[in-house]
Amino acid sequence: MNCPHAEAAPADPGAGTITIDPMVQDLDGETTRLRDAGALARIDLLGVPAWTVTRHAEARQLLVEPRLVKDINAWELWQSGAVTHAWPLIGMIDAGRSMFTVDGPEHRRLRTKTSQALTPRRLEAIRPDIEKFTEELLDALDAARGEDGVVDLKAVFAQPLPMRVVGMLMGVDESQHAMLTRQYKAFFSMLTPQDERLALLAELDVFYTDLVREKTARPTDDLTSALIQAEEGGEPLTEEEVVGNLKAMVAAGHETTIGLVLNAVRALLSHPEQLRMVLAGEAAWDAVIEETLRWDTPTTHLLMRFATEDIAVGDGVIRQGEGVVISYRAIGRDTEQHGPDADAFDITRPTRGRHMTFGHGPHICPGAALSRVEAGIALPALFGRFPGLRLAVPDEEITKLPVMTQNDMAAFPVLLD
Ligand code: STR
C-alpha cells in the first residue's frame, strides 16, 4: 500500500468498509451502521484501513487479549511507512511513553500511582474543591448571559470545570488553563492542518517537560509530584514517563468529562419526563450518569491496538500487524447487551450500569470514579440553580465538532430560566 493519506483522492476503501466521517455530520447514523456491520467491521480512517469492534461481548474479549498491544511498532502500516506523521490521527496513537501506550508489567509500573490517587475514597478529599469550582462556574454562567438571555453552557461551564479539576490534581496553574483548552481543541479538530497539529504537540511537550522539571525541583501536593517521587517495583518513572502520564491525564481528564456533562444535559432536555423524575427525586442522578455514559459515550472511537498474532473474533480474524479500534458509541447501543430498545435513552433501564464506556481490562479508565464524582456534582447543582434550564435552539441545530475520536459538541446554547 502506498501513502494512504496522500493529498490525492483517497483510494476506494472497498466494499463493506465504513468510512468514518471526519466532519461527524451524522453520528447516530454512523453508530447504527457500525453496530449493524457486525462485531468486527472494516473502517477507513482518513484513508487508513483498520478493524473496529462494535459489540460489547467481543470488545470485552479483545480488551483482555494480551496479543493485542498499544505499541505502534506492532502496526504493519507504520513499519512499512504507509502511515506517517502526516496522518492527522497519528497523535492519538504515537503519544509518547505512558500508561496509555504501554502494556504488560511495564504498564502496571506506569499506572499504579495514578489509579491509587483516583480511588473513590481518595476522591472524597477533593469533593469540596469540585463543589466550589461548580458554584463559581454557575455564577459565571449567570453573569455571561447575553442580551437575549442565551449563554453557551459548554464554553462557560462544562469545559472549564473538568480543566480546573484535573489542573488542581496535576498541579497545572490556572493561568495555563485557557492555553490548554485552546491547544486541545485544535489538536482534536480535523480542520487543523497537520503541520499545525504537530507544532502544537511539540509546544505541549515543552510545556509539560518544564512543569515536570519545576515539580522535580520544588515538589508540591499534587499527582505530578507524586509520580516523580514514585518508585513502582523499585524503579522510579523516567522524566519521559512522567511527562507522558501527565499529558494523558490532562488530555483525558479535560476532554471526556465535557462530553459526559453536556450529553447528560442534552439527553434530559430532550426527555422531559425523565428530567421531571430526577428533579422530583423519583430517579437518581447516578442513573442519569450511567445511562448517558451508555447511550451517548464521550469517546466514539478509541485508537488503536495492534495484533501481534492472528486473533479470531466472532467469525472474523484480525491478522498479525493489523490495527483495531474500539467503537464505544456503537458498543453502548449493542442490542445483545441492552435489549432491542438500546437506541432509547431510558434512565430506568436495568442494564444502564452494565456499559463498557470506561473500557475493560488493564487499561480501564483510571479516571472513571473522578468523572462520576464531577458529573454527580455538576448536574444536580446546575439544575438546582437553574431548574428552568432549556435549549436556546432546536435540538437538531446542535452540531458536532469535526473530531473523529471524541463525541464533541461545537456549542450548547441555553436559556437559564
Ligand atoms: C491525546 C494527546 C496526548 O498528548 C496524549 C493522549 C493520551 C491519552 C488519550 C488522549 C491523547 C486522547 C483522548 C483519550 C486519552 C485517554 C482517554 C481519552 C484517548 C492521545 C479518551 O477519549 C478515552
Image (cartoon, rainbow, N blue to C red):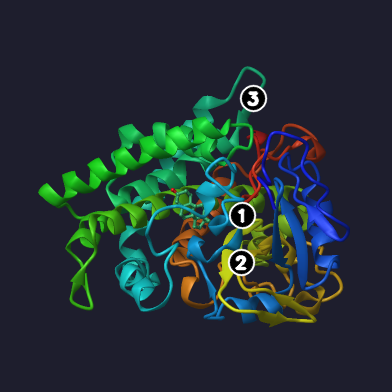
Residue 354 can be seen in this image = no
Whether 413 is drawn above or below 240: the answer is: above
Q: Quick one: SS at disc 2?
A: loop
Q: Distance between the residues labelled 3 and 2?
A: 35 Å
Give the mark nearest the N terminus, 3 or 2. 3
**Element at badge 3?**
loop
Residue 391: image quadrant is: top right
Q: Quadrant of the C terminus?
A: top right
Q: Mark 2 points at which residue?
A: 357
Q: Which residue is drawn at 44% across and 34% down?
A: 200
Q: How many labels does the image show?
A: 3
Outermost residue on the top side: it is 147
Q: Distance between the residues labelled 3 and 1?
A: 28 Å
Left or right of residue 326: residue 342: right
Q: Which mark is residue 298?
A: 1
Q: In which quarter of the image is residue 233?
A: bottom left
Q: Does the residue labelled 1 lie within 8 Å of ligand 1?
A: yes
Check disc 3 and report the residue beneath it: 149
- Residue at the farthest left position: 217
Q: Identify residue type, mark 1.
A: Pro
Of tags 3 and 2, which is closer to the observer? 2
Q: What element carries label 1?
A: loop
Residue 278 located left or right of residue 28: left
Viewer-side label of 3, 1: 1
Q: Please name whichever residue, 188 or 379, is drawn nearer the observer in this view of the structure.
A: 188
- Circle 2: residue type: Thr
